[in-house]
Amino acid sequence: MVSSSKLVFDRVTAGRTCRDLWHPRFASCLRYNVHFWRTILPGSFKLYIPLLVLPPLVKLNDVTVRYLVEHTLQYVYISLCTYVQAALSLSAQCVLHNLLGRLNYWCVMFWPCLLGVAIGPPLPKQLLRLQAITFFNMSLEAAVRKSTSPVIQYARRSKTLATLTFMAFSSIILTCLRSGIVKQFWLVNPLQDAPLSKKPTGSVCSHAGRCWQYLADGMLKYGMVGIILEAGRAVLRKSKLLAQNPLAIFGQEFRSACNLKLGMFLACYVGIFRAGCCVLGRLNTREEVSHAAVAGFLAGVPYCLYPTYQIYTLGLTKAIEMGWEYCGNKTLNGTKPPTSIGVSLWRQLHRLPMLRLVQMFSFGYLGHVYAFYPHVSPVFHQKAMDVCSTNLTLDMKRRIATWLSEVM
């Protein structure tokens, strides 16, 4: 499939240049580069608005002025970094064409996007993890959609199999978090034991306050986060409509773009997990790590309410990442001698910049899929590319589709 696509692309681009593909309105690459370096900055800030809004809503009771300032600075920094990554990727399209003297199949989007991230400004580990996991999740989604394997196709269609495996991912994640060895973001974080002074008399639960208050607070908070997140996505999808008529946000077309199922999923997920931990803790007179495993497994059941690639791939990658960190920390801090082969291998593997490598190659693959297999490209990634490039990549994709249709 790749070789045939490459042959067709080489055929239709014979004699064509980067001007034909990227900037027909600009006679030179220099003028084109000056243009987009000046104009695409707002798109990156627009893309990360959900990142600016959602974390304070989740923390809500713990929000301070210092946290808001630091969080806002993080939003500004990752937006600026994404702008530079996007601009470098667009610049690399022309640079690679001029170096090779022709349009190359892999030098349209794949290598430019990879290079744009590789030579772009470094991100702090927290933001690097966010971007790398997001890119990898979307890459995995695209790869699954693109695959013709019967096994993968069956797994795609089976909601039961997807729900059961997501329940397993959820159990692994929450077990790792409850152990205290792993500290990362997930949909819900299990609490370590609260101070006795904050617990009701006779309580065996880890949380402060009464169980019903703890349960209701979590369901309401995370349910609202889901609704706001879907509203943000609807704004992104209907940005053109809202730009023409801001009052359309109250109209039927915008309301139909909002999906309440994410809010229901998050509320049920948090509710089942918290209720499960409380019930198991009371039955055993105290909460244990194993309770998080059981409650986490049961909490995955609501996935059937919102069976999406985004939630599933997030669960898969976080289970892998947290399991990797848990096993690595247990191995490196365990009782085995530091000269053993297992410990030595883990240390060598942990020295690799895995997040950086995942970030680079995932973004390159996503760019390749966006250009040549748009029917399997994640919708969010397509919107992100269009927004961050002010539709320059969209125009390029349409030109490729037009050229390919001429020989199909």
Image (tube, rainbow, N blue to C red):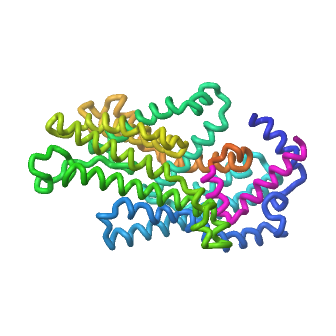
Looking at the image, which residue is at 49% across and 62% down?
Answer: 50
Q: Left of 183 or right of it: where is 210?
A: left
Using the image, determine if residue 75 lies above or below residue 365.
Answer: below
Using the image, determine if residue 308 lies above or below residue 126.
Answer: above
Q: Is residue 103 magenta?
A: no
Our reading of the magenta stretch's main secondary structure is helix
- Horizontal and vertical percent for residue 85? 60, 61
Q: Left of 168 or right of it: where is 403?
A: right
- Horizontal and vertical percent for residue 37? 67, 70
Residue closer to the observer: 381 or 37:
381
Residue 349 in view (yes/no): no
- Horizontal and vertical percent for residue 303? 46, 40
* Quadrant hosting residue 272: top left
Looking at the image, which residue is at 26% across and 34% down?
Answer: 290
Q: Is residue 390 magenta?
A: yes
Looking at the image, which residue is at 48% across and 50% down?
Answer: 262
Q: Left of 362 or right of it: where is 303?
A: left
Looking at the image, which residue is at 83% across and 39% down?
Answer: 7
Residue 153 in view (yes/no): yes
- Horizontal and vertical percent for residue 17? 84, 57
Residue closer to the observer: 332 or 11:
11
The C terminus lies in quadrant: top right
Using the image, determine if residue 382 lies above or below residue 49.
Answer: above
- Residue occupying the far top of the picture: 150
Which stretch is magenta?
Answer: 379-408
Q: Left of 11 or right of it: where is 113?
A: left
